[in-house]
Every structure is written in C-alpha cells, then in structure tokens.
C-alpha cells in the first residue's frame, strides 16, 4: 500500500499547489475569493501540502498526522454543512453564507450543472450527491477507513469539478476551491494514522 500512498500524495501535491496557483490568480486578477469558511479549509489544506513534503515532514514529527486529522474534519464539516444548507438549517435562501437554503433551490442548481438531463434524473443526481456527502462527511469525522474515504471524497470533488467548469465557469470553481479540495482529500487518504507503528514515509 505504501507505493499507492506515495502516488496519491504526489497527486495531492499537484492538486493542492496547482489549485493554490488558481486561487491566487483568481483572487488577485479577477477578485474572486472564497468565503471565510472555505478559505479556512483551503489554508489548512495548503499547510498539509507543505507539511507532507519529504524534507519538511522529516523535521515535523507527528505534525503532518495532526494536520491530516484537522483537514479530514474540516472537509467533513464542509460536506455536512453543504447538506445542512440545502435543507435550510442555516436559514432561507438569500441569507448571509447560505448557498441554497432549501431543497428545490439545490435541485435547480443541480439542473444547471447537468443541462439536458430530464427532471427525474436531475433529482436522482441531487439525492445521490447529498447521500454521498453525508456518508463521506460522517466517515471523515469518525476516521473510519480514511484511506478509502479520502479517495472517495477526492473522486466526488473531481466529479463536481467536471460538472462545474462548463456550466458555472472557472470563477465558481475557484470560489469553492475545488482543485484544492481534491488535493486535500488525496493527502488525507495518504497521511499515516497515529495507530500505524511504522515510521511514515513521505518520499
């Protein structure tokens, strides 16, 4: 499994640092910045990316593992928060920090991401996305099978990236920090847990 961890770690670095470049270009060139919650998650992901670089990780001891847990929890909060948002738990549509505010608004947003699909298929996609986010969010918080859950979360974010680019554009992708979320999930899946006795290999 170590070579697979290494491959995911390299992929995570590429997504994190490539995504960071996109965030900086989007912010300074086009004034597209994420909200403070998303921004907090992205900062933590950036720190995890730096902390897991081989020469850095050798000097930090258990800090990369701690950051892996922190990022896993933050990703979980983001996923579960998105689920709560679409059921109006943060307030109605139009409230500060609310993306949808109700289920019909989320289904309409999903329809915009999947143009051409019939309404029943859009509803199925919205339900599937919600279930996936809820399950992955809970699994990330409890730390269950983090290697596989991290990969699944990265795959889900990658699906969102593919759906968002042609429909809502690069600006929204940058606003939500999707490339860095993909990288963060990959790094979470490849960061050793505290219960592993062998020394972590970040090379």
Image (cartoon, grey):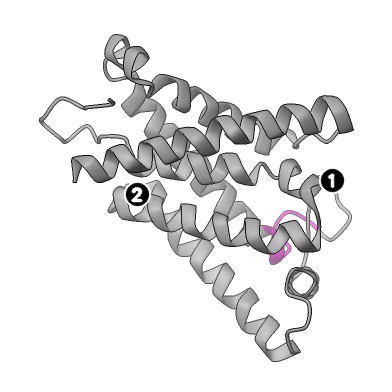
The residue tagged with tag 2: helix, strand or loop? helix
The residue tagged with tag 1: helix, strand or loop? loop
Relative to the observer, which residue lies in front, 162 or 85? 162
User: How far apart are labels 1 and 2 at the CA level?
Assistant: 29 Å
Region rendered in magenta? 85-91
Across and down, in percent, residue 163 comes to 68, 64
| Crowd around label 1: few <14 · some 14–19 · many ≥20 (10 Å) | few
For image coordinates 48% across by 58% down, the residue present is 155
**Magenta stretch: dominant SS?**
loop
Disc number at residue 96?
A: 1
Residue that extends furthest to the left in the rendered view of this protein: 197
For image coordinates 45% across by 38% down, the residue present is 12
| Vertical arrangement, residue 176 with respect to residue 58, above or below | below
| Vertical arrangement, residue 88 with respect to residue 188, above or below | below
Across and down, in percent, residue 202 comes to 28, 26
User: Quadrant of residue 66 in the image?
Assistant: top left
Earlier along the polypeptide chain: callout 1 or callout 2? Answer: 1
Residue 25 magenta: no
Which residue bears the numbered disc 2?
A: 142
For image coordinates 81% across by 45% down, the residue present is 171
Relative to the observer, which residue lies in front, 192 or 103? 192
Residue that extends furthest to the top in the rendered view of this protein: 59
Across and down, in percent, residue 140 comes to 40, 49
Direction from residue 146 to residue 182 in the image, left or right:
right
| Vertical arrangement, residue 185 with respect to residue 33, above or below | below
Across and down, in percent, residue 49 comes to 46, 27
């Amino acid at each position: 499994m170590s070579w697979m961890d290494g491959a995911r770690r390299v992929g995570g670095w590429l997504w994190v640092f490539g995504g960071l470049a996109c965030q900086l270009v989007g912010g300074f060139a086009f004034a597209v910045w994420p909200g403070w919650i998303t921004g907090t998650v992205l900062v933590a992901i950036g720190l995890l990316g730096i902390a897991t670089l081989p020469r850095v990780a050798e000097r930090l001891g258990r800090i990369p593992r701690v950051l892996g847990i922190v990022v896993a929890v933050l990703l979980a909060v983001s996923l579960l928060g998105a689920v709560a948002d679409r059921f109006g738990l943060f307030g109605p549509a139009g409230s500060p920090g609310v993306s949808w505010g109700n289920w019909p608004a989320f289904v309409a947003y999903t329809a915009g991401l999947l143009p051409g699909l019939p309404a029943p298929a859009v509803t199925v996609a919205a339900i599937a996305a919600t279930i996936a986010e809820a399950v992955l969010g809970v699994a990330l918080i409890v730390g269950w099978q983090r290697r596989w859950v991290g990969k699944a979360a990265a795959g889900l974010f990658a699906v969102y990236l593919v759906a968002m680019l042609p429909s809502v554009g690069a600006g929204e992708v940058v606003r939500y920090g999707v490339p860095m979320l993909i990288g963060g999930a990959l790094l979470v899946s490849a960061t050793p847990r505290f219960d592993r006795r062998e020394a972590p290999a970040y090379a």
